[in-house]
Image: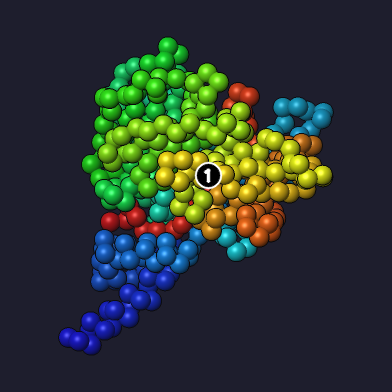
């Protein structure tokens, strides 16, 4: 009996180190292995190890495959195809193309990545856009139920992530009409249902557009605009409470702001003002500490590189796209904020335009077996 337990413990110690795709193949080895790998305890152990050691981590990017030239002066309507793909953190060589799991040839958007799950929907969100939670590593998909809300909303924002306090995956959808009627809905993966939030604070009835948001520790964050004032709205998907944080005075253009997580703190990155140092440019950073914004030292780089922040990696590296105006793409760089080291990845990001706002998309993706059991 003791020998069998030791043997099983050794097997778990070996299997838990493997990537999710390899473990999925082992499901067909025998019933005992299938039961072990698909058990909730093994799924949790595998995920916790990846999180603790930052193993099986990738960059998830919307990029140009087989890039040659996107802009043709003789044909202004010519555009190179873009697609979502995974790139290992070590080599940055494309290892997996993420075609739509339902076979659709339409472009889709990713609205959050957490513990191996990604939330996907239409590239331009509508009130009736289908929403899916997908684990591309194990090829499992959950299509969210259709909301019972019958109002047609003109502006929709969507965020997704894990709430450790309630041990559940949540999607938060904010919707607004042209007359500032507002609705907020929360989806729970555990109950597979939507809930309409009834109590909307008066200050939230304001303008917001396709500004990027983020999701951290169960809280959705979004940039909102109230006349000349810009704020960060937070919504806890567990307690269902709203908070407002007035943005620093220096932030004058929300389209130039990136909101993400740096060292477990909500961080604002703003690349608008010129650097006082000759021949250099800068990106200003603030982190939210005890409900106040604390400004950090700016990230300074040579002028003329035309960097645009896309986010922050799991290793707290700045993900920055260097815009190439002639070719119509952006080269992705990883920048170590503290050491100021800059690493070129060779990944050509697609530039997506919504109205007058341009977006670059790159996220951290970590393999997991979540949704397997």
- Looking at the image, the residue that sits furthest to the top is 179
Residue 54 x %, y %: 48, 63
Residue 281 x %, y %: 74, 43
**The C terminus sits in image quarter:** bottom left
Q: Which residue is mark 1?
A: 294
**The N terminus sits in image quarter:** bottom left
Residue sitting at 57 percent across and 60 percent down?
88
Local secondary structure at mark 1: strand
Residue sitting at 61 percent across and 28 percent down?
252
25 relative to 30 in the view: left or right: right
Judge by depth and name the residue closer to the eye, 140 or 30: 140
Residue 77 x %, y %: 72, 27
351 relative to 23 in the view: left or right: right
Residue 147 x %, y %: 30, 27
252 relative to 153 in the view: left or right: right
Judge by depth and name the residue closer to the eye, 356 or 241: 241
Color scheme of the displayed model: rainbow
Residue sitting at 37 percent across and 33 percent down?
243
Give the tally of numbered discs. Answer: 1
3 relative to 270 in the view: left or right: left
Can residue 66 be spotted in the picture? no
Q: Is residue 261 above or below residue 220?
A: below
Judge by depth and name the residue closer to the eye, 86 or 334: 334
Q: Is residue 208 above or below residue 341?
A: above
Judge by depth and name the residue closer to the eye, 183 or 45: 183
- Looking at the image, the residue that sits furthest to the left is 1
Can residue 308 be spotted in the picture? yes
Residue sitting at 27 percent across and 39 percent down?
239
- Other residues around mark 1 within 10 Å, as few (<14) / some (14–19) / many (≥20): few
């Amino acid at each position: 009996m003791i020998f069998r337990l030791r043997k099983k413990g050794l097997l778990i110690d070996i299997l838990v180190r493997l990537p999710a795709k390899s473990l999925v193949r082992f499901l067909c080895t025998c019933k005992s292995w299938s039961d072990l790998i698909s058990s909730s305890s093994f799924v949790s152990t595998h995920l916790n190890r990846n999180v603790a050691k930052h193993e099986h981590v990738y960059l998830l990017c919307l990029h140009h495959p087989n890039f040659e030239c996107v802009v043709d002066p003789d044909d202004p309507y010519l555009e190179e195809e873009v697609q979502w793909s995974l790139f290992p953190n070590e080599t940055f060589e494309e290892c997996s193309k993420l075609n739509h799991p339902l076979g659709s040839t339409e472009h889709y958007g990713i609205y959050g990545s957490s513990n191996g799950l990604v939330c996907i929907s239409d590239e331009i969100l509508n009130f009736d856009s289908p929403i899916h939670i997908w684990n591309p590593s194990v090829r499992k998909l959950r299509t969210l139920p259709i909301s019972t809300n019958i109002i047609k909303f003109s502006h929709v924002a969507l965020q997704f992530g894990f709430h450790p306090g309630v041990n559940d995956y949540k999607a938060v959808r904010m919707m607004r009409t042209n007359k500032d009627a507002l609705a907020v809905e929360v989806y729970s993966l555990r109950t597979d249902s939507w809930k309409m939030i009834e109590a909307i604070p008066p200050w939230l009835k304001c303008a917001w557009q396709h500004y990027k948001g983020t999701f951290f520790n169960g809280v959705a964050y979004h940039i909102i605009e109230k006349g000349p004032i810009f704020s960060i709205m937070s919504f806890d998907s567990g307690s269902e409470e709203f908070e407002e944080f007035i943005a620093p005075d220096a932030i004058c253009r929300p389209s130039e702001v990136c909101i993400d997580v740096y060292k477990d703190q909500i961080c604002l990155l703003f690349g608008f003002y010129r650097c006082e140092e000759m021949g250099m440019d800068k990106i200003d950073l603030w982190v939210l500490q005890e409900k106040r914004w604390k400004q950090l030292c700016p990230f300074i780089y040579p002028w003329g590189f035309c960097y645009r922040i896309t986010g922050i990696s799991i290793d707290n590296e700045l993900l920055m796209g260097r815009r190439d105006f002639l070719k119509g793409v952006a080269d992705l760089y990883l920048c170590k904020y503290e050491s100021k080291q800059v690493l070129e990845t060779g990944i050509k990001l697609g530039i997506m335009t919504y109205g007058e706002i341009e977006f670059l998309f790159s996220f951290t993706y970590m393999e997991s077996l979540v949704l397997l059991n």
